[in-house]
Structure formats: structure tokens, C-alpha cells
């Protein structure tokens, strides 16, 4: 039975500590929509998305009202379009992006993900068609998100895809230059992409998933920060225990919402993603958690160790609270979406090299980082390659979501609003990586891939 203190604690988490369900994401398979006729295929996909997700928003809002739990986003992910549309007789995949946009608008969701390709080992004709279409697709839609998986621990890194994605990021930035490269905020380049990720922009519905599922992403950096204020100067093992207990509380709420939503929608329950996802709001920052552990500013020496403790403790606490844990599950460090990260980047303490080191021990990678608009495509590809190498060797998911903002230079700042926040333009190394990227080919999978 819940005590009065338990109830008051939970109310305080919502009212004062920014606790929320960051997203309910419905994954929908489009494999049964395949058709050689492009028009028929598009219509089948639209009809299935609209049918499956027509009640997603209303059910989410009903759960919010009944339980008093904020659910910030309702989203959809679909089978990677490069796979689902591969049999269609067309070279222009923007028709599928625009179909996704219409379906998302009809269902009333915040974003739809799955304009995606999986090319870690090579390209199919459908993969190439989709990748070449990404800049137009993201510039001509508002709600569509795209991802490309260019490497994995099993396959190695497809360096031809890495080189291509550097150019795609640049072209996307150019086509949305009037909006501070906002198209790039909807594009993620992955290594070891997971099939059950509820978070955008990287969500897609994996081919091993059921026909439709409900995934939930929970967020609570503010709750963890508040909990740590009660154990100042305590040993780090006490800090770890505090984070574990807090993560358990947060995840139980996510488990309840996931079970309730899947029951009401008549679809399978997928996973609860344990990730601490920050927002630009003061008091909802992963960086401030690290500073509460004793760092003067996020990015200084000791940051990677503190982040490793946080990430591990979140996983240990959350895994006991949910029947099915998945997605990315850890601590996110998107610069533009975390007011503490923004402050540390503007201070100069947090730089690209330190961010890269931090990604070795937490979720995802170089995320929501704005860089000078004159950065060349090969440098962006090299940043992608570095992150992919970390993911490949460490058997973890890493990614790059980077914005080369035309006309902006180090010291400038962009404002994107909402959960995307704002970002200082961060410097990149000036020395060239072009010859390395132009080699192409594949970086072989590491020895730890041979686990059979």
C-alpha cells in the first residue's frame, strides 16, 4: 500500500522536478503494404498507419488526465522505408515521406520516424534511393524523422555510407538554411541502431518486431538531480545507490503507462526505455546531475567517470522495475536540449573531444551539436566514423545528430525552440580528414563480433 509520503513524493516529482513520460511511441510494421505500384503502396501504408494509430493521441491524453502523469509526446515509428518500399517502381522516395507526414498529421502525433535505411554491410537499390532523397524529404516535411545505420559490431563500418552521409547532412543543412539547419535535427546516423527505440529522431520499427507495439520512453533528470541534493558529500557508492532507487521509481511509472496504453489500444506492449532525456528547462539537465556529484562544470576532468556512474546506476535501478527494458536506456547528452550542457559549451569547458569521450559510457553520441556552416562534408563524415568506431568496438549504440548551420560561426548561437532548445556553435578541428574518408571501403568488424 502507498503511504501518504509516497503519494506526496510522486506529486512533487511531477510538479517541481520535471518528471514526465517523454513519449509513447507506437511502432507499426509496413511489410504487408509492399506493392510494385507506388501509388497503391503509398495508399496501403497511409491506411495502415492511420488505422493503427488513430486513437494513440486520445488514449495518451486520457491516461494523462486519469493518472495525472504528463505525457509530453505521442509518436509513431514505422518499418524502415528503404525496406518497406524496396519493391516499388520509383526513384523518388519523397512520396513516402509526404505520406508519412500526412499520416502523422491525421493521427495528431508530434513526430513520425522510419524514413530510414540499414546499410552497415552494403547498399540495396532501395537504400540508395532513400538516402539520396533524405535532404528533400526532411526539408519538405515537418514531422518526418530519418535515420541511417552505417555500422555495427557484427558487420563493421560501411565507410562508403559514412562518406555519403557527410554529404547528405551538408545538403540537408543547405536546404533548411533559412531555419538554422532544422532538417539536420531530424536526421540521425547510427552504429548498432536498435529496433525498439521510442525516441526521435532515430526511431524506426524493426523487422523482428510484432505488427504493432507500444514503447514508452521515461525521463527524469530533474528527479535524479533533486535526489542527489539529499546526499551531498556522501561517498560515490551512496550516490550510485540513490540514483538506482530513483531510477526504479521513475521506471515503475513508465511500466504502468506502457501496460495501460497497450491494453487500451489493443496492441502488444513493447519496451520501457530507461533513458534520462533532458530538456532546455532549468532543473531538467543531465549536466547539472554531474555537477551535483562534485564537478564545477560539466566537461571538466572527472566528467566521464561521473557519467559512467550515472548511466550504470540508471540501468541497474530501471531494469528491476520493468518487464521488458529496451531502446537506448541510459543518459542522453544532447547539447541543445540540456541547459547545463549549453552553459558548459558556451563556457568552453565542454568541447567536441570531451563529448566524444563521454559517449563511450552513455547513450547515443554526438547529439544536437551545432557546428560552423563552412565545415566540410568530409569532417562531418570523420565525426560520424569516430562515433561509429566507439559503438562498434564497445558493442553499444552510438550516433551523430549534427547541424552545420550556414552563415554561423563559433561564438554564434541558434534558437530552435521547444524541446530542441538552443545551441552555441561549437568548434571542430581544422586539420583535414578528407584523404581518410575518400578511401571508402569497410572497416572490418572487431574480434568481439565472433561470439558464436
Image: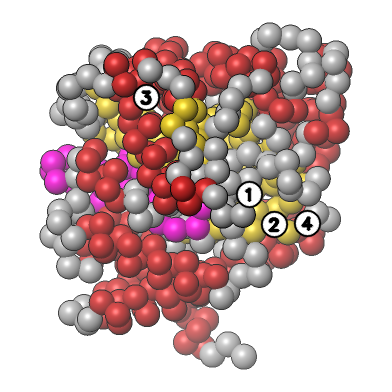
- Contact check, label 4 and label 3, Cβ < 8 Å: no
Residue that label 4 marks:
268
Which residue is nearer to you in this view: 145 or 434?
A: 434
Residue that label 3 marks:
381
Task: Give above or below for 263 relative to 40.
Answer: below
- Contact check, label 1 and label 4, Cβ < 8 Å: no
- Mark closer to the observer (3, 2): 3
Q: Secondary structure at mark 2?
A: strand
Q: CA distance from mark 3 to mark 2?
A: 33 Å
Q: Secondary structure at mark 4?
A: strand
The percent coordinates of residue 431 (x first, y second) are: 17, 22
- Contact check, label 2 and label 1, Cβ < 8 Å: yes
* Residue at image location 50% in from the left, 84% down from the top: 6
The percent coordinates of residue 49 (x first, y second) are: 77, 35
Query: Mark 4, residues whose alpha carbon is within 10 Å: few (<14), some, or many (≥20)?
Result: some
- Contact check, label 4 and label 2, Cβ < 8 Å: yes
Amino acid at each position: 500500500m502507498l503511504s501518504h509520503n509516497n503519494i506526496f513524493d510522486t506529486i512533487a516529482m511531477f510538479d517541481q522536478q520535471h518528471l514526465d513520460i517523454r513519449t509513447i511511441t507506437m511502432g507499426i510494421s509496413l511489410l504487408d503494404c509492399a506493392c510494385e505500384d507506388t501509388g497503391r503502396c503509398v495508399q496501403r501504408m497511409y491506411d495502415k498507419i492511420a488505422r493503427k494509430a488513430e486513437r494513440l493521441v486520445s488514449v495518451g491524453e486520457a491516461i494523462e488526465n486519469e493518472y495525472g502523469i504528463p505525457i509530453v509526446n505521442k509518436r509513431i515509428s514505422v518499418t524502415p522505408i528503404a525496406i518497406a518500399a524496396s519493391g516499388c517502381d520509383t526513384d523518388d522516395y519523397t512520396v513516402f515521406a509526404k505520406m508519412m507526414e500526412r499520416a502523422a498529421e491525421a493521427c495528431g502525433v508530434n513526430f513520425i520516424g522510419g524514413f530510414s535505411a540499414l546499410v552497415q554491410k552494403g547498399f540495396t537499390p532501395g537504400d540508395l534511393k532513400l538516402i539520396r532523397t533524405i535532404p528533400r524529404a526532411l526539408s519538405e516535411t515537418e514531422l518526418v524523422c530519418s535515420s541511417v545505420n552505417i555500422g555495427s559490431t557484427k558487420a563493421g563500418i560501411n565507410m562508403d555510407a559514412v562518406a555519403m552521409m557527410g554529404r547528405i547532412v551538408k545538403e540537408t543543412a543547405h536546404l533548411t538554411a533559412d531555419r538554422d539547419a532544422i532538417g539536420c535535427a531530424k536526421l540521425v546516423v547510427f552504429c548498432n541502431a536498435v529496433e525498439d527505440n521510442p525516441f526521435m529522431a532515430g526511431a524506426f520499427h524493426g523487422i523482428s518486431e510484432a505488427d504493432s507495439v507500444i514503447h514508452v520512453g521515461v525521463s527524469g533528470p530533474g528527479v535524479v538531480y533533486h535526489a542527489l541534493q539529499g546526499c551531498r558529500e556522501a561517498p560515490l557508492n551512496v550516490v550510485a545507490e540513490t540514483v538506482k532507487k530513483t531510477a526504479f521509481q521513475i521506471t515503475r511509472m513508465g511500466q504502468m503507462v506502457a501496460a495501460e496504453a497497450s491494453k487500451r489500444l489493443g496492441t502488444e506492449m513493447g519496451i520501457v526505455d530507461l533513458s534520462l532525456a533532458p530538456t532546455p528547462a532549468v532543473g531538467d539537465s543531465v549536466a547539472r546531475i554531474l555537477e551535483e556529484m562534485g564537478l564545477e562544470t560539466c566537461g571538466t576532468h572527472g566528467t566521464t567517470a561521473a557519467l559512467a556512474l550515472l548511466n550504470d546506476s540508471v540501468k541497474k535501478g530501471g531494469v528491476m522495475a520493468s518487464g521488458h527494458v529496451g531502446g537506448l536506456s541510459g543518459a542522453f547528452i544532447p547539447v541543445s536540449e540540456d541547459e547545463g550542457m549549453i552553459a558548459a559549451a558556451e563556457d568552453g569547458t565542454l568541447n567536441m573531444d570531451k563529448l566524444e569521450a563521454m559517449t563511450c559510457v552513455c547513450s547515443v553520441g554526438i547529439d544536437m551539436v551545432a557546428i560552423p556552416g563552412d565545415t566540410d562534408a568530409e569532417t562531418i563524415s570523420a565525426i560520424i566514423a569516430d562515433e561509429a568506431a566507439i559503438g562498434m568496438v564497445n558493442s553499444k549504440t552510438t550516433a551523430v545528430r549534427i547541424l552545420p548551420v550556414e552563415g554561423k560561426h563559433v561564438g554564434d548561437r541558434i534558437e530552435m525552440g521547444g524541446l530542441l532548445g538552443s545551441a552555441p556553435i561549437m568548434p571542430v578541428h581544422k586539420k583535414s580528414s578528407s584523404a581518410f574518408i575518400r578511401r571508402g571501403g569497410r572497416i572490418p568488424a572487431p574480434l568481439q563480433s565472433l561470439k558464436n
